Amino acid sequence: MRSLRCLSAEALAAHIPAAAEQSLDCVAHDLYPLLFKASFGLERADVLQALLTRWPLEEFRLGALLGPSADHPEDLRDRPCRPCLEACVRGLGAHVLRTQSRTRLRLADLTGLRDVQEPRCRCAQPLGRWGRTQLLARACLELQAEPRAAERPAVQVLADLFVTEGNFEAVVGALRPAGPAPLHLRCVSFRADSLRPAQLLQVLQLAGPGALRRLDVVHNVRLHAGHVEQLLAQVRFPQLTALTLPAKAFDAPPAHRGLPADEDHHLATIAQALSQMPQLTELSVAFSTLTGRVQQLLGPLQTPLRTLDLANCALNHTDMAFLADSPHATHLEVLDLSGHELLSLFPSTFFRLLSRAAPSLQILTLEECGLSDQHVNRMILGLSPCLRLRELRLLGNPLSARGLRRLFSGLCELPGLRGIEFPVPRDCYPEGAAYPQDGPAVSKFNQDKYEEVAGQLRAVLLQAGRDDIQASTPLFGTFDPDVQETGHELGAFLLQALKSALEKFSRALEQME
């Protein structure tokens, strides 16, 4: 329930006319945070800009201001409203240039927003992480060109940056000012896509890597083990807690391919660099070939991992045996082993891993692991100790409607389970169809039969009193707000990469002739 202070703040934010914003100077300083949240909820961009211009406190922390509080219990962090955020940045710029009074603001933390599939902005104009990065970078550049900038004390600005080819130059300019910079931009989390390795290295060196907590290098950044080794040698990340690398990032450089595994020193050097990151607890290296080398990579780490993504890494029995017996196993909260036929190739080590991870495991992803009806009973038994498991993702496994019903009956016994991603039952596809389905074929199934089976599965959950479990089949993966926001740019990047590859192939054919 909102407090009387909150209701009063909302009434003031709703009715204050634009011409009367000077009256904010009469508001008690300790009421500014509550008035800011009330104005953000009402999407009063004019009031937000005035508040930031006059902000009387030494710190402004956006995520904390929009989160639940005793006065205002509603959580507004999933409302990245474009007009409101633009007003905040304009107000921040006006604040550092004010001459009427001494600037008090020292730190502006603009992190903490959540990008969701259906943001609750009334304006229906959400601003994603890439857009927020672009907005902030342009504001920094404009202020650097302002003659009054040299006279004002600098404000440290913490941000979650998302850098691609499209905003690379603006971000570099903001991070490497040619003159006085009233806003000192520092990065807390960094996501990179569609950048060349040299661009990635350049922008990371500028982004204040000593304070970086999360680094996600994804999709269209073409890295191999040599690039990763160079990156970790030239840029130190002492505070990094989470690292995601793109496909094939741990594969040997082209010139080294074909050498025996013990002659590839890149992975050993990378592992040593990772071991110097004492806070690292999340690691995603999906689609890198790590056959027989998981111990070499994870063995030197000083801190047990809580999140580990080894999807489609071509693991063998040695790798699984190491995982099952390693210190990481008893700390894992999120585990992805998709793309490995676990129950056919190494069932005992997989279930030993599950048993050791059971007290902590919360999210388990086993997509395209060849799980079929014959494995259901063992899966139920293996998952039974995982009492904290919240999400189970099983897309791409050749389970029938009957097998899924049996599996759902067993999963109802897991008290913490809240979400199941299940595959389209195999018997919904034409007889003899390959499984898992790929490309356009994935959507060519009997929709009526699928709906019938989905209804039966929901009935299993309801009969067991587990209507708190959400079951779904996201055929094309879960929603990624960052990809959604930059889809056009990334598509153009892929087309350019394809064109370049075809040109190289054509030149090679000409040389052969």
Image (spheres, helix red, strand yellow):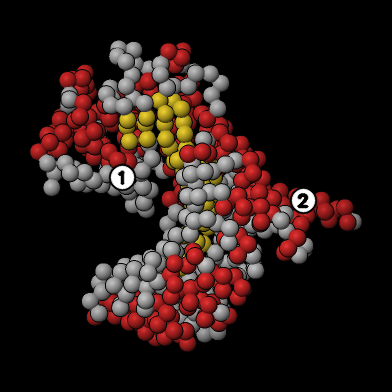
Quadrant holding the C terminus = bottom right
Disc 2 is placed on an element classified as helix
| Marks 1/2: CA–CA distance | 47 Å
User: Image check: 43 left or right of 215?
Assistant: left
The three-letter amino acid code for the residue at tag 1 is: Arg
Can you identify the residue that label 1 sits on? 77
Q: Residue 233: give x, y in percent of width and height.
A: 64, 44
Residue 191: in sight, yes or no?
no
Closer to the chain start, of discs 1 and 2, is 1
Disc 1 is placed on an element classified as loop
Q: Which mark is residue 512?
A: none
Q: Residue 492: give x, y in percent of width and height.
A: 59, 46
Q: Is residue 510 above or below residue 39?
A: below
Q: Is residue 6 above or below residue 459?
A: above
Q: Mark 2 packing: few (<14 Cα in 10 Å), some, or many (20+)?
A: few
The three-letter amino acid code for the residue at tag 2 is: Lys
